[in-house]
Image (spheres, coloured by chain):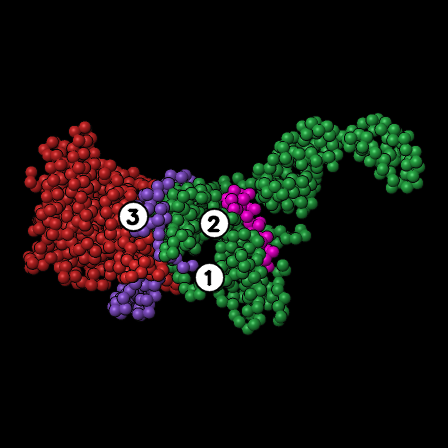
Chain colours: A purple, B green, C red
């Protein structure tokens, strides 16, 4: 499948990436090449093959319902680019 | 409101499905050891993984799994021994990971059923599609700064059960009855506190309309995060009317997400430029598939409490309560328990009347929860015993109750202190009556001609005994003597 | 004493235990080496002062009788492991200045056993790359030089290029790496050192910046098989914080070293003979097999029929997971946030802040992979791409499982070429071919180790890869050491400190 400029724009929007106009055609070419490469898989017969969920082959381990984390706002907020008291601050969200 | 709307072109059926988000009762979050306590200072109930710090990993909370299974069993649903957590990818200010961990393809609970109670003792079974576990999001605060929003992640990662009904509901009454019943069951199970004001339960309300008799579903809208039973009804009614008007006016319903505005009683479109969501679900590679043992499920099943439907049937059968009364008493587990404590070894119907009548009335008026009732079940039982043993009359009992509610004293104490003990001794009452008869011959003659005037004698006896004569005995004696 | 930094971990352990030198002396020697070879660009954040303090502490502990397995051993840490209080960047601008308030499980384990950290090593941005040319903090240079083009700077491979270069240049005795599709083994081969990717689930991923969660695995990089065994013994272990880590005991990984390969069956998979592979690689591969045969191993031709499908499947699974794993880098809670547009107090919207921050914060390769990942997961494509790739993973895992019914270990080349010039770097899909031999084991989750066995015509190191059964690293290391002994690889890089 060939990726168009529009598909690049759509993928960039989904991934929240600003892509310069000048780069879109280049990216479309690069992404098409990758997709062309991975589409070799079409030739492999995977009828009745279960998708691999985990190489470990185990199932989920669960933990006890105990409060043993949190109550350390400094550890959580220490690297915040912008904070006000104990809140993270971001540009205004328009609902 | 009816299940249908009469439009200009004919009758329309209202079709509703509810997706209820119920916060799982647990100490810690679904995938982290941070507390789920409500109302903490911002970003205090946040573990490193909740803030999506690099390299942090989720670890599944066993109790949350247990609670989901328990809820599933409570709605007679199939439990899926194999379930998988998926990532739902989207960007939002209060979604730190950039994805929500949820269960799309393999939910933990499959199809079930819930019986809703309608007016006049009717009930109807509503299909439930599934229950899955997922993470709650955080909170954005928009009104503190002109240019910025503030983010609090305290709720981020708290476990939610999303309980999805089939589109089996018709009309606002059924939708609200469903929510009420679901809330009741979850509270019985202890899997959700049902506290709607705090957001512990909220519903996404899917509404569509179709011409009566049509079997195809119309285009639906989804009204998000409706957080009260009343608002659900209002949202359904508003939305159904809006859709009918739209369709009858030649328009089309747009499949979209809407918001309910409780102050206006209206729904409105959430985003004008609604972006097509593409959540790119895939199994979360940080979490292995969840494989439960049948024994794990069986143990939970063996431990299920009596649920409202069963309790209601038992109240009708064992206590001879009406379907309606039994329904009122079982709506909340606490009420049912309270009632049973009052009724135990006493007159059950009298107990039901007192719980639902005087007690509820007084609690309502005082704005007090049953759990904080100044009159305990034991105390109310004492009062009912006093009535049953003719120690006081029903009328006096109301005064005694009022004092009990005010002072917290027991019925016996109040009866003693105020000397309210009823006189049932026939001899004493007869003496008083004879005295009155002999002093009032003219009244006696009139009463013999007109039995309605016997009431005057009742009043006189009561007066003479300070209101403590047993009215039954008084009446009996008057009838004997004045024929 | 001037060449303490050139010792293996095993030698240094012995030397310090015997009191021949202290950890401070050893560490100082590494710190000096780091200064001398700063031009390799191996470190993003060197921490010499902290290292010397830790070394002094280690010496004190030793004096007090402590004999931690890695006590006083100076190591480099790939800058993908979160280290408390020390900047952790994943070689990305988007994490510039990020100082974790926590320590990864693997580095905690190393610290527990007495290791001294020299600093944070360069890598490809978010571990995405095979050449270490995608780091925001500059390229890493391979300390080896081609005899044909001695002036040309060579890539160290990637993504653990800083680790490989630093170990090869003797800046540290060992280093941590992570391997998603070959990120330990390929740079180890390019730099003439030994690198082990353990079984998926053997080392905790907690505190390691995630690239592709179902593939990422930490492992040791060092100058001998024995050193890798020693490091793995500290790094490995069940971690309740990582539910994909496996709850099996950590054995003594040195237990079977020296036991040789007599009586073992070693598989040679025919599908690893790929078109265009240089003859010298094929030759070294076969020579290695011959040497093992000479030591008493039985060499068995085997087939891993889905080998060719591994790389395309990998380039669906890894970007898909990465696109989701990297969604958290949004400028809100840590790391880089782009400046608001000129003259405005704030971005007009959160969306704009996200897109600008991520557009400026991620490099091109990362953006490419994020977009591919978003694309293959998007509505309507999930089954055709992601699910298909997962099915292919099942087939690859089955290939290995049936092969291991016949053989004890599998021998392959590590890479289809020796290190190439930074300016000769292939692009796009061609670049991905670097991982063609390493990716299948990653997809199946099995352990693999690259051991240097010889030189290319141009005098560059070449490695072979030994693959083993899941969680049987003890046996794998035994075979690897037999390969090492037989090859007797003693060459050293030109740019060695």
B286 on left or right of C166: right
The boundaries of the magenta stretch are B168-195
Image location of residue B257, percent across then percent down: 47, 61
What SS does tag 2 mark? Answer: strand
Mark with earlier residue (1, 2): 2
B27 on left or right of B188: left
A10 on left or right of C416: right
Mark 2 and 3 residues: CB-CB less than 8 Å, in contact?
no
Camera-nearest label, 1 or 2: 1
The answer to whether any part of residue A67 appears in the image is yes
Specify the label residue B161 is tagged with. 2
Q: Nearer the viewer, residue B239 or C316?
A: B239
- In percent of the image, x 51 and y 55: which residue is there? B226
Chain of the residue under label 2: B
What SS does tag 3 mark? Answer: loop
Chain of the residue under label 3: A
Distance (Cα) linking label 2 and label 3: 32 Å
Q: Nearer the viewer, residue B169 or C462?
A: B169
Q: Nearer the viewer, residue C355 or C5?
A: C355
- In percent of the image, x 7 and y 51: which residue is there? C494
Chain of the residue under label 1: B
Query: Vertically, is A68 above or below C306?
Result: above
Q: In which quadrant of the rendered view does residue C66 lie? A: top left
Image location of residue C330, percent across then percent down: 32, 55
Question: Which residue in the protein does label 1 denote?
Answer: B270
Quarter of the image where the C terminus of chain B is located: top right
Specify the label residue A79 is tagged with. 3
Query: Vertically, is C178 above or below B171?
Result: above
């Amino acid at each position: 499948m060939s990726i168009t400029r529009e598909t690049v724009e759509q993928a960039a929007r989904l991934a929240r990436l600003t892509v310069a106009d000048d780069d879109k055609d280049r990216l479309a070419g690069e992404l098409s090449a990758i997709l062309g490469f991975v589409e070799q898989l079409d030739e492999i017969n995977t009828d009745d093959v279960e998708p691999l969920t985990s190489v470990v082959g185990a199932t989920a381990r669960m933990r006890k319902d105990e409060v043993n984390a949190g109550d350390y706002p400094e550890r959580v907020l220490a690297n915040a680019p912008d904070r006000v008291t104990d809140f993270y601050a971001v540009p205004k969200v328009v609902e | 409101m009816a299940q249908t709307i009469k439009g200009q072109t004919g009758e329309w059926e209202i079709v509703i499905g509810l997706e209820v988000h119920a916060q799982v009762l647990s100490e810690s979050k679904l995938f982290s050891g941070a507390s789920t306590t409500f109302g903490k200072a911002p970003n205090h109930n946040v573990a490193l993984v909740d803030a999506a710090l690099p390299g942090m990993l989720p670890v599944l909370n066993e109790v949350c799994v247990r609670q989901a299974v328990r809820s599933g069993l409570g709605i007679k649903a199939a439990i899926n021994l194999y379930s998988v957590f998926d990532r739902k990818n989207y960007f939002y200010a209060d979604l730190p990971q950039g994805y929500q961990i949820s269960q799309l393809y393999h939910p933990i609970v499959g199809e079930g059923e819930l019986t809703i109670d309608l007016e006049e003792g009717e009930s109807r079974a509503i299909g439930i599609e599934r229950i899955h576990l997922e993470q709650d999001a955080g909170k954005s605060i928009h009104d503190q700064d002109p240019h910025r929003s503030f983010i609090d992640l305290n709720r981020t990662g708290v476990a939610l059960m999303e309980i999805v009904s089939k589109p089996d509901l018709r009309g606002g009454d059924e939708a609200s009855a469903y929510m009420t019943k679901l809330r009741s069951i979850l509270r019985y199970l202890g899997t959700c506190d049902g506290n709607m004001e705090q957001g512990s339960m909220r519903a996404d309300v899917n509404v569509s309309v179709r011409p009566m008799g049509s079997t195809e579903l119309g285009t639906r809208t989804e009204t998000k995060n409706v957080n009260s039973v009343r608002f659900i009804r209002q949202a359904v009614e508003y939305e159904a009317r809006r859709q009918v008007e739209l369709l009858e006016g030649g328009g089309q319903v747009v499949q979209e997400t809407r918001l309910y505005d409780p102050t206006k009683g209206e729904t409105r479109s959430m985003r004008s430029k609604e972006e097509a969501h593409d959540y790119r679900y895939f199994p979360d590679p940080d979490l292995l598939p969840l494989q439960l043992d049948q024994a794990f499920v069986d143990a939970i099943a063996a431990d299920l409490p009596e649920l409202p439907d069963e309790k209601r049937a038992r109240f009708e059968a064992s206590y001879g309560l009406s379907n309606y009364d039994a329904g009122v008493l079982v709506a909340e587990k606490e009420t049912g328990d309270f009632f049973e404590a009052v009724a135990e070894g006493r007159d059950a119907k009298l107990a039901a009347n007192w719980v639902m009548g005087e007690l509820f009335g007084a609690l309502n008026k005082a704005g007090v929860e049953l759990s904080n009732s100044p009159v305990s079940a034991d105390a109310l039982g004492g009062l009912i015993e006093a009535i049953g043993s003719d120690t006081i009359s029903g009328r006096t009992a109301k005064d005694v109750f009022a004092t009990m509610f005010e002072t917290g004293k027991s019925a016996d104490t109040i009866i003693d202190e105020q000397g309210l003990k009823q006189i049932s001794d026939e001899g004493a009452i007869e003496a008083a009556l004879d005295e009155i008869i002999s002093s009032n011959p003219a009244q006696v003659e009139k009463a013999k001609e007109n039995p309605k005037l016997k009431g005057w004698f009742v009043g006189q006896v009561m007066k003479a005994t300070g209101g403590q004569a047993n009215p039954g005995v008084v009446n009996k004696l008057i009838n004997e003597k004045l024929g | 004493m001037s060449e303490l930094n050139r010792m293996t971990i095993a030698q240094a352990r012995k030397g310090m235990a015997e009191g021949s030198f202290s950890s401070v002396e050893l560490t100082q020697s590494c710190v000096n080496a780091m200064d001398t070879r700063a031009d390799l660009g191996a470190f993003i954040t060197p921490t010499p002062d902290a290292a010397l303090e830790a070394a002094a502490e280690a010496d004190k502990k030793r004096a007090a009788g402590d004999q931690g397995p890695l006590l006083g051993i100076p190591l480099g840490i790939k800058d993908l492991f979160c280290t408390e209080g020390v900047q952790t960047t994943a070689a990305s601008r988007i994490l510039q200045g990020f100082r974790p308030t926590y320590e990864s499980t693997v580095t905690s384990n190393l610290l527990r056993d007495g290791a001294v950290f020299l600093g944070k090593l360069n890598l490809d941005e978010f571990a995405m790359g095979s050449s270490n040319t995608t780091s925001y903090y500059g390229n890493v240079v391979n300390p080896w030089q081609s005899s044909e083009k001695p002036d040309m700077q060579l890539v160290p491979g990637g993504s653990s290029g800083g680790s490989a270069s630093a170990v090869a240049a003797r800046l540290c005795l060992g280093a941590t790496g992570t391997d998603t599709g070959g990120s330990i083994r390929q740079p180890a081969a390019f730099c003439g050192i030994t690198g082990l990717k353990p079984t998926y689930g053997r080392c905790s991923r907690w505190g390691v910046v995630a690239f592709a969660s179902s593939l990422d695995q930490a492992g040791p990089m060092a100058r001998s098989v024995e050193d890798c065994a020693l490091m793995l013994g500290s790094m490995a272990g069940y971690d309740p914080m990582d539910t994909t880590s496996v709850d099996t005991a950590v054995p003594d990984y040195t237990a079977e070293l020296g036991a040789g390969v007599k009586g073992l069956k070693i598989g040679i998979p025919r599908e690893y003979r790929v078109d265009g592979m240089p003859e010298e690689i094929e030759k070294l591969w076969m020579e290695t097999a011959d040497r093992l045969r000479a030591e008493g191993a039985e060499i068995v031709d085997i087939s891993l029929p889905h080998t060719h499908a591994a790389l395309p499947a990998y380039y669906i699974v890894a970007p898909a997971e990465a696109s989701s794993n990297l969604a958290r880098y949004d400028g809100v809670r840590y790391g880089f946030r782009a400046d608001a547009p000129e003259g405005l107090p704030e971005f007009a919207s959160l969306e704009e802040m996200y897109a600008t921050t991520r557009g400026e914060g991620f490099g091109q390769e990362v953006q490419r992979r994020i977009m591919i990942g978003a694309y293959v997961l998007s509505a309507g494509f999930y089954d055709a791409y992601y699910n298909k790739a997962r099915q292919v993973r099942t087939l690859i895992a089955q290939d290995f499982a049936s092969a291991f019914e016949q053989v004890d270990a599998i021998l392959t080349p590590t890479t289809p070429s020796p290190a190439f010039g930074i300016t000769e770097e292939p692009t796009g899909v061609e670049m991905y071919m670097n991982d063609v031999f390493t990716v299948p084991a990653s997809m199946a989750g099995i352990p693999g180790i690259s051991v240097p066995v010889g030189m290319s015509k141009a005098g560059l190191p070449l490695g072979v890869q030994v693959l083993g059964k899941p969680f049987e690293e003890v046996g794998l290391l035994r075979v690897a050491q037999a390969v090492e002994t037989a090859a007797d690889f003693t060459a050293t890089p030109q740019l060695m400190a």
